[in-house]
């Protein structure tokens, strides 16, 4: 078993042409995940000079290369609860931002000819207890009644059993606009497209400090390669572990890096995979500590979850892999003989309200906090923040929102075990 991401292991790494830090650029982007690469492509397309500085040795090797492979529509929070808090109009607009984000990914895949097995087969949210069906039905009714997502559909237990070979589920809610793709191959295609349009992408280049030049948007970025002066800077650093607290401290006090973990089986073969998940959708169970799964094009099962409330490290990933293996066996006992080929973890950039945050502070632009729903939103927001930096403030669907610091959160998330205990108890009592 490899303690490595299937997506990065099964895709060639992007080998960029840039190897020297230029001294100036119109736009500098800190972070070469999907947010940063998508922004770089959009900035380069309008003819501005843009440099991406990525700390790791490979682009999109953090969350963007370590996720579950779902490109889902729908919010990370319950639509009706959100509408009660912020009003129907805002909640509807934010829900639709996810639809647009899936469209953005699909458009880029098509326009740039990215070979990444993109499919739109929908997402099925699965009830693991009979009493969860009432909540799913209420959600579906509300999404239809408010004209937010008229295509959602409730599937009863028999219909779910016809497409998911497991006795665990009591029905589900189908979101038809959701998709899926191979994250490693998408990353390669996105980076190559940005470079073709003129972006310079430098890996192995952590930004250590950012210095504001006067009161403008211009900054000097300090790295071991030297410094770069940019007229505008976008922070696309996700749940960053790089960079000193000085330049990034404000963001770190607002983002909790939470570990999520994944195992991938050996290929099940076409026939066995087809029998297991006939509709080849993305699947998520209803729970605070949930499971998510899907098949790959080469017929493996990708099975993930927030197995433990811990941050990701090789030991932590292996321990979580054992917990996930048990979850997989409980869901699909018929796969008991199947080998696990990959196991890894990654950090989700969770925010307190579980919504993304994007905007500008002290002359620096930022977009992050996708809270586990970010493969589509990061790509979308990269484009949108490029438009914001070009002067179109309305392009940012998450504008004009407060983003208070999380009380007591200054650095490593010491409170995760307690949060985990709370959610496990909540799931048991639900
Ligand atoms: C295990 C897991 C499963 C997930 N599953 C799903 C899913 O199925 N569907 C979904 O929608 N979302 C999922 N997500 C979330 C999704 O992957 C992320 O929201 C999205 O990829 C975020 O992209 P990003 O570019 O903003 O951040 P990242 O991909 O984390 O990229 C940020 C980059 O910034 C770099 N960086 C940080 N600091 C510095 C610095 N100082 N200098 C230079 N570079 C720096 C990092 O090295 C990193 O490469 C999952 C996340 C995880 C961890």
Image: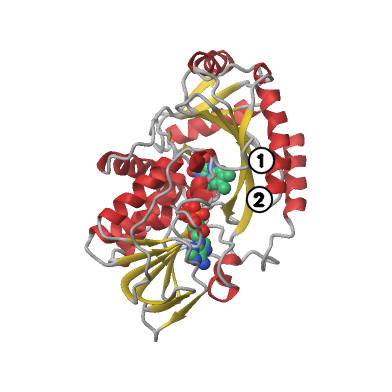
| Left or right, 370 with reference to 291 | left
Q: Is residue 318 left or right of residue 56?
A: right
Query: Is label 2 in a helix, a strand or a loop?
Result: loop
Name the residue rendered at 54%, 70% in the picture.
248
Frontmost of labels 2 and 1 is 2
> Does residue 324 appear anywhere in the picture?
yes
Label 1 near ligand 1 (CB < 8 Å): no
Q: x and y percent of residue 267 in the render?
A: 54, 24
The dot on residue 312 is 2
Q: Position of residue 417 (x, y in %)?
A: 76, 51
- When the figure is inspected, residue 8 is found, relative to residue 388, above or below; the finding is above
Q: Which residue is painted at 72% across and 47% down in the image? A: 315
N-terminal of the pair, mark 2 or mark 1, is 1
Residue that numbered label 1 is attached to: 288
Where is residue 117 drawn, in percent x and y?
Answer: 39, 32
Q: Is residue 75 visible?
A: no
In the rendered structure, are the residues bearing label 2 and label 1 in contact, judged by CB atoms less than 8 Å apart?
no
- Label 2 to label 1: alpha-carbon separation: 19 Å
Q: Residues within 10 Å of mark 1 (few under 14, many from 20)?
A: some
For label 2, being within 8 Å of ligand 1 is answered yes
The quadrant the C terminus occupies is top right
Say whether residue 162 is left or right of residue 389: right
The quarter holding residue 340 reads top right
Height in image: 241 above or below 293?
Answer: below
Q: Quadrant of the N terminus?
A: top right
Q: Dot 2 surroundings within 10 Å: few (below 14), some, or many (20 or more)?
A: many
Q: Which mark is residue 27?
A: none
Q: Position of residue 238 (x, y in %)?
A: 52, 57
Task: Provide the secondary structure element on which disc 1 rests.
Answer: loop
* Residue at the extreme bottom of the image, as rendered: 214
């Amino acid at each position: 078993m490899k303690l490595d991401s299937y997506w990065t292991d099964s895709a060639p790494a992007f080998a960029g042409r840039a190897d020297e830090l230029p001294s100036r650029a119109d736009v500098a982007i800190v972070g070469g995940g999907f947010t940063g690469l998508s922004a770089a492509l959009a900035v380069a397309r309008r003819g501005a000079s843009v440099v991406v500085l990525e700390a790791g040795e490979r682009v999109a090797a953090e969350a963007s290369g370590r996720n579950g492979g779902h490109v889902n529509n729908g919010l990370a929070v319950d639509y009706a609860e959100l509408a009660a808090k912020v009003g129907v109009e805002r909640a509807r607009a934010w829900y639709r931002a996810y639809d647009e984000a899936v469209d953005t990914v699909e458009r880029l895949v098509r326009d740039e000819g990215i070979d990444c097995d993109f499919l739109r087969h929908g997402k099925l949210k699965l009830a693991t207890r009979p009493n969860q069906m009432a909540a799913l039905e209420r959600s579906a009714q509300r999404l239809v009644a408010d004209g937010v997502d008229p295509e959602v559909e409730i599937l009863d237990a028999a219909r779910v059993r016809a497409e998911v070979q497991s006795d665990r589920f009591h029905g589900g809610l189908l979101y038809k606009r959701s998709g899926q793709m191979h994250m490693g191959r998408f990353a390669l295609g996105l980076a190559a497209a940005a470079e073709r349009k003129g972006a310079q992408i430098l890996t192995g280049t952590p930004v250590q400090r950012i210095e504001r030049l006067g009161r403008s948007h211009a900054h000097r970025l300090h790295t071991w390669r030297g410094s770069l002066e940019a007229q505008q800077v976008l922070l696309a650093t996700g749940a960053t572990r790089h960079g000193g607290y000085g330049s990034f401290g404000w963001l770190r006090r607002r983002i909790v890096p939470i570990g999520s973990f994944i195992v991938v089986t050996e290929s099940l073969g076409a026939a066995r995979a087809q029998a297991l998940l006939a509709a080849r959708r993305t699947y998520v169970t209803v729970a605070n500590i949930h499971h998510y799964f899907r098949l790959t094009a080469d017929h493996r099962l990708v099975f993930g979850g927030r197995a433990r409330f811990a941050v990701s490290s090789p030991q932590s990933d292996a321990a979580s892999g054992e917990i996930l293996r048990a979850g997989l066996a409980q869901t699909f006992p018929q796969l008991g003989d199947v080998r696990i080929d990959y196991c890894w973890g990654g950090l989700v950039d969770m925010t307190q309200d579980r919504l993304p945050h994007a905007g500008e502070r002290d002359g620096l632009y930022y977009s992050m906090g996708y809270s586990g729903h970010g493969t589509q939103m990061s790509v979308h927001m990269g484009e949108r923040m490029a438009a914001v930096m070009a002067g179109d403030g309305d392009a940012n669907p998450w504008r004009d929102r407060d983003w208070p610091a999380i009380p007591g959160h200054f650095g490593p998330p010491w409170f995760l075990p307690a949060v985990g205990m709370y959610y496990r108890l909540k799931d048991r009592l639900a």
